[in-house]
Amino acid sequence: VQLVESGGGLVQPGGSLRLSCAASGFTFSSYATSWYRQAPGKERELVAAITNAAGSTDYADSVKGRFTISRDNAKKTVYLQMNSLKPEDTAVYYCNALSIWGGVAYWGKGTLVTVSS
């Protein structure tokens, strides 16, 4: 089982990044997926979530209107499009997959996003 994030990096305030999370080793279409982030010295927080069939999404108030979560079940990949980035978006971003039947969850190792001029 693997979740591998990519797409992080250094971006200036106001810029954009697109994170990807590629899944393998499990039935991706049976898992809801989410993006979390953890800034230095802070707890991990939920950023965005999407149901297994991509029928519903949810966002943290701090990113609403700026971030968009999506997924491609055929490619077993979930995405996070991040626009109008702010310095406070700086964090390690983690991908999470949660079984629709509950009880099983997987995490990626994270990708660092740094927003700085």
Image (cartoon, rainbow, N blue to C red):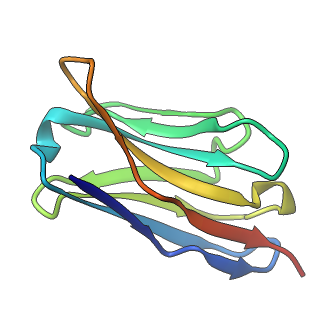
Quadrant in the picture for the C terminus: bottom right
Residue at 72%, 64% (x, y): give it: 84
Q: Closer to the camera, 80 or 56? A: 80
Q: Is 55 above or below relative to 20?
A: above
Percent x, y for residue 81? 51, 62
Q: Closer to the camera, 65 or 101? A: 101
Question: Is residue 7 left or right of 66 when viewed as pictured?
Answer: left
Residue at 86%, 75% (x, y): give it: 116
Q: Is 38 above or below relative to 53?
A: below
Percent x, y for residue 21? 36, 61
Question: Is residue 62 left or right of 20 when viewed as pictured?
Answer: right
Percent x, y for residue 89? 75, 56
Q: For residue 45, which quarter of the picture?
A: top right
Question: Is residue 55 left or right of 75 when viewed as pictured?
Answer: right
Q: For residue 106, which quarter of the picture?
A: top left
Residue at 48%, 66% (x, y): give it: 19
Q: Is 98 above or below relative to 39?
A: above
Disc tally is: 0
